Image (cartoon, helix red, strand yellow):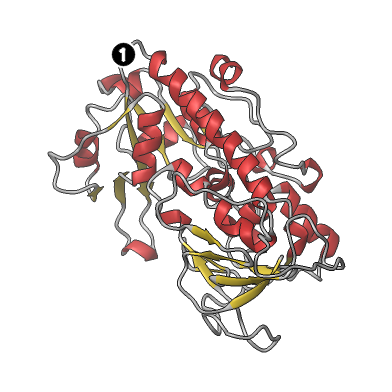
Amino acid sequence: MRFTTSFAATAFFAAAMAASSTDGLQSTQCVSSDASDDLYSHKVDVKYAKLFSVDYHKTYKKPSEKADAYIEVPVRSAAAWATTAAIFIEALGVQNNIKNLGTAPSIVSPCLQKLLQERHPAVQRRAMPRRPSSRSSRTWTPSRTNTVYSVEYLEGSALGRSEWVKFFAPFFNAEERANKLFDSVASNYDCFKSKASKEYNDIRPVIAWTSYAAPSKFNNNTAYWQVSYADYKYNLVRDAGARMLNTTDHQTTKFTKSDAFLHALEEADILIDESGLSYNYTDLLKNYGIDDPSKVNYTWVKNSRIYRPDLIQSAEGGLGWFEAPFAFADRPAAGHCRRRPPQVHQGRLQVELVPQSRPRTRRSLWSLPDSCKDELAQRPDPCQPVLDG
């Protein structure tokens, strides 16, 4: 089975499967059944995700992805072409079934790094083609490719993205674990959401997601600034008890003049900057066209409320922002709800204040294989201590 990726897409499993084993059975065990037996004691029920479903029948299960391939389950050999796909497989506890990691240099997860370390070169570390040789096949042979595309990145909510763990689970007969993991994520997320609604005494701060691109050959040597309105960011901000900046009075959310960009941010209380890692507070203000902070009246400047994704890195430069927030929606929710910089929980808490002085060294942000832990076994505590931390 092959997993592919384009820029943000995760490509994965074939859509229909003929079951050959029941939940919890090893591949060496024999199963006797007839058409009246239900082979799947554990099933997933999709509640938040809008872009997939799973239909269960007595002897097979069918995700909503359109294809005509039949895959024997549980899948024992898979190729992951995307970091988001790999993190879902890890969350299910079946990362050892990954035989090819096409995005190996970008992997931040300690457990996937450990897999690469222990099984390299068995797990290939080379980039793979962006497109599979075949979308699906009717027969399972080494010469044919069974590929399915998942689109969790298109979901409009953080929980909708995380619920895609239930899309991957049927391929590994891991529905029971997927349900437990997602229930924990959703429970934590809802706890943060409930607490956050009371955090600001009904005065909801205005948040803007922003970024700066320096002049380069990729933008015709023309700097630009952006305000992002991705649906999942809007919903994350809302669920954290805040409001998204409203720029409907402006003609664009991409600006080539810093003064127009700053004008659009006049009502913002908090910024979350996505420009990158190698800058400090002063550098960021200069990139935004502010040389002297004392001469401006923006709330986010006066109160030093500029955050950024907590860009935990692999030693080769991969960014954790493209992994954990997909599978574990409660992690970025925790970061949004905190009032001061958080302590990182296994390198997966996702929002931090931009440092006032020089940035932390790159090594201090590295995620290393020796910190690998089972995700389900070490879920974070209920959200109250996190909000107070």
Q: Residues within 10 Å of mark 1 (few under 14, many from 20)?
A: few
Q: Residue at x 48, y 28 (%)?
A: 190
Q: Residue at x 73, y 56 (%)?
A: 23
Give percent across and percent down for residue 162.
Answer: 52, 46
Q: Is residue 153 above or below residue 272?
A: below
Q: Is residue 42 above or below residue 33?
A: above
Residue found farthest to the bottom: 143
From the viewer's side, name the closer residue of 11 and 221: 11
* 102 lies left or right of 373: left
Q: Secondary structure at mark 1?
A: loop
Give percent across and percent down for residue 13.
Answer: 58, 69
Give percent across and percent down for residue 193.
Answer: 44, 25
Give percent across and percent down for residue 46.
Answer: 49, 49
Res 209 quadrant in image: top left
From the viewer's side, name the closer residue of 373 and 272: 373
* 169 lies left or right of 46: right
